[in-house]
């Protein structure tokens, strides 16, 4: 689980979940994204075998605290989890020993379908930069031009992601209400 990487879109900076979060909550948010499974994994949950899906974590508050680092307290983590759940970013089911956290819209954040289907090409392009050329530090302008020309799908806007999160939160709340 400590190998690989996650996608972190710059548009997160404009999302209310980021803008209205305290620094501790931002650390917890990124840590949860890093801890989430990127593929199915077998675990034990409630004493039974459980297949943990991509975007899910079976963990504990102490484990999250250890991964976040020293200044983050258990109280910070509890507060952040409640806030993120209220905003529809995640669901959180706990037991006395551990908890199952599910990142809602994991596929939206990580776009795992597109990245797994692309063939890997290890050959270097003919027009690559030579060592004496200046490197381009930021390709944001190029990426925006590609999106305008229709050369591939654009990531969802924050408004669209907020709508999806709200829909997921509503479905979860309705399911909890109906199961009572």
Image: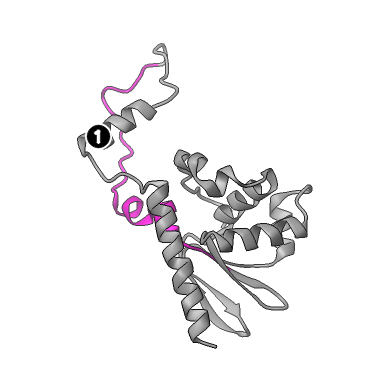
Q: Position of residue 178 (x, y in %)?
A: 48, 85
Quarter of the rendering containing residue 165? bottom left
Relative placement, left or right, of 63 versus 53 is right
Residue sitting at 53 percent across and 79 percent down?
Answer: 50
Q: Magenta stretch containing residue 128, yes or no?
A: yes
Q: Position of residue 97 (x, y in %)?
A: 72, 76
Residue tagged by mark 1?
148
Q: Residue most toward the bottom? A: 180
Relative placement, left or right, of 131 versus 144 is right
For the N terminus, the image quarter is bottom right
Residue sitting at 59 percent across and 49 percent down?
Answer: 30
Q: In terms of depth relative to the viewer, which is nearer, 139 or 179?
A: 179
Q: Position of residue 68 (x, y in %)?
A: 70, 51
User: Does 138 sit above or below residue 9?
Assistant: above
Residue sitting at 46 percent across and 46 percent down?
Answer: 7
Q: Position of residue 162 (x, y in %)?
A: 44, 54
Q: Secondary structure at mark 1?
A: helix
User: Does 40 sit above or below residue 178?
Assistant: above
Relative placement, left or right, of 109 versus 124 is right
Q: Magenta stretch containing residue 124, yes or no?
A: yes
- How packed mark 1 is, by other alpha carbons closer than 10 Å (few <14, some 14-19, many 20 or more), is few
Write down the region rendered in magenta.
Answer: 101-130
Q: Residue most toward the top? A: 132
User: Does 52 sit above or below residue 13?
Assistant: below
């Amino acid at each position: 689980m400590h190998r690989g990487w996650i996608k972190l879109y710059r548009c997160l900076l404009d999302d209310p979940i980021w803008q209205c979060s305290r620094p501790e909550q931002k650390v917890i948010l990124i840590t949860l994204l890093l801890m989430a499974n990127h593929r199915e994994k077998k675990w034990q949950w409630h004493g039974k075998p459980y297949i943990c899906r991509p975007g899910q974590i079976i963990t504990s508050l102490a484990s999250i605290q250890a991964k976040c680092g020293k200044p983050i307290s258990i109280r910070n983590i509890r507060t952040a989890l409640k806030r993120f759940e209220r905003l529809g970013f995640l669901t959180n089911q706990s037991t006395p020993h551990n908890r199952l956290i599910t990142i809602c819209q994991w596929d939206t954040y990580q776009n795992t379908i597109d990245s797994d289907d692309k063939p890997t090409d290890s050959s270097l392009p003919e027009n690559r930069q030579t060592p004496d050329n200046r490197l381009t530090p930021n390709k944001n302008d190029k990426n925006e031009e590609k999106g305008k020309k229709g050369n591939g799908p654009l990531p969802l806007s924050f408004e669209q992601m907020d709508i999806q999160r709200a829909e997921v939160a509503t479905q979860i709340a309705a399911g909890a209400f109906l199961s009572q």
